[in-house]
Amino acid sequence: MRAKWGVAVLISLVTGLASVPGAAMPAWGSGGFPAGHREATGKTLREAVGEGGARMGAVLTGGSGREAVPGNPGGRAAVPAEARAVDTTHPTRVVGTGTPAGCTSRAVVEAVAAGGIITFSCGPAPVTITLTATAKVRNTGAGVVLDGGGKVTLSGGGRRRILYMNTCDEAQGRVTGRCDDRGQPQLVVQNLTFADGNATGQMEEGGGGGAIFVRGGRFKVVNSRFLRNRCDPTGPDLGGAAIRVLNQFRGRPVYIVNSTFGGSAGQGGTCSNGGALSSIGVSWVVLNSVMTHNTAIGRGANPARTGTPGGGSGGAIYADGDRFGVRIAGSVIQDNSAREGGGAVFFVSNDRTGTLTIEGSTLRGNRSAGFETEGFPGIFFLGAGRPKVVSSTLR
């Protein structure tokens, strides 16, 4: 049943490619990501900005000429060590040689295939690199850390997916055993903008992931922005205009930290389900981030109603599967919409073991045109008990 939109619910419950000689990937920490993180203090984004936000990098807003720190500056969620940005002061390889001319699609694709810690040297001004082929992570190495320094936009040009990692894809190297539960490769993207990615028609592994598709290994996003990405407009279970994830090593979560999806009218993602994020059987931890103006445009829900193609759920986040969790903390999810259910979040745990937790966050103006869970505006939830909402505003 749907709640009335005019009622605010404030709930506070106590319940050009240059290789750098001698550089290598850092040792992987106990949490699965490289040790030696840039944000090693555990401070909130607001505190970090006050002490030197330039270190995290200002990200260009969709070519508008305006710069801003991605994510929610007011977010006060603590960021655990494994979720922080990786120290990239000693890169394995560098894209570019100091001018935009060396920062080409080919250089990016070759760097990602080679792996390691990758940074950019494209000159002092922000630069957009439009890919003519999807950059793909190989399964033969430890993985990729891709750091744009707050000045690089990777664009799909409205024609292709931008970044791809799949531990079960034999075309990317040797596949062994339980391929979707491998600890490597691991992918970190930080201080980057991903714009105009398009996975429409890319139906391998069920489709989705307009900007980034991941299956297996480990994955996290830090201090980044996702603009105008999209994937197929219909389908009952495909999604993720920005990001689609299937499986993570030993069920560890995907971290989304200090990042923005959309941010203003016309900048959000569009897909059948999950205008920002989509997954099956994957846990998410979303910290100090912003998701606005994303849209789930499918029709017929899941399973698809008779006579419909299915889809239309999870304006911002679409999470399906069995045992998994979604935690949203210090974040703003606003003005997203779903043609069917869950204008902000669609959450279905088929075996009813999954949990949804919202802490210190604001969810407002997220339109569910079809259905949502009574008392939780913008959310459709089937899982263990009820969503746990702490010191947050839902309306």
Image (cartoon, helix red, strand yellow):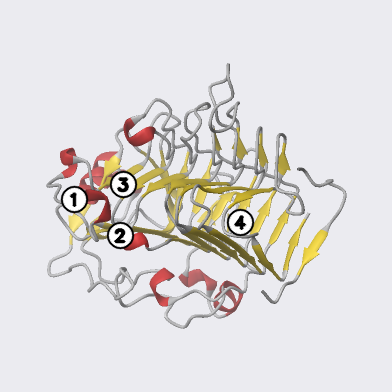
Whether tag 3 and tag 4 are in contact, CB under 8 A, the answer is no
Q: Which mark is residue 139?
A: 1
Question: What crowding class fits label 4: few (fewer than 14 Cα within 10 Å), some (14-19), or many (20 or more)?
Answer: many
Give coordinates of residue 28: x percent, y percent.
Answer: 25, 71
N-term-proximal mark, 3 vs 2: 3
User: Is residue 161 placed above or below 102 in the rendered structure?
Assistant: above
Helix or strand or loop: what does disc 3 sit on?
Answer: loop
Q: Which mark is residue 103?
A: 3
Q: Amino acid at mark 2?
A: Phe
Q: Amino acid at mark 4?
A: Val
Give coordinates of residue 168: x percent, y percent.
Answer: 23, 44
Helix or strand or loop: what does disc 1 sit on?
Answer: loop
Q: Which residue is mark 4?
A: 290
21 lies left or right of 58: left
Helix or strand or loop: what does disc 4 sit on?
Answer: strand
User: Is residue 258 placed above or below 377 in the rendered structure?
Assistant: below
N-term-proximal mark, 4 vs 1: 1
30 lies left or right of 244: left
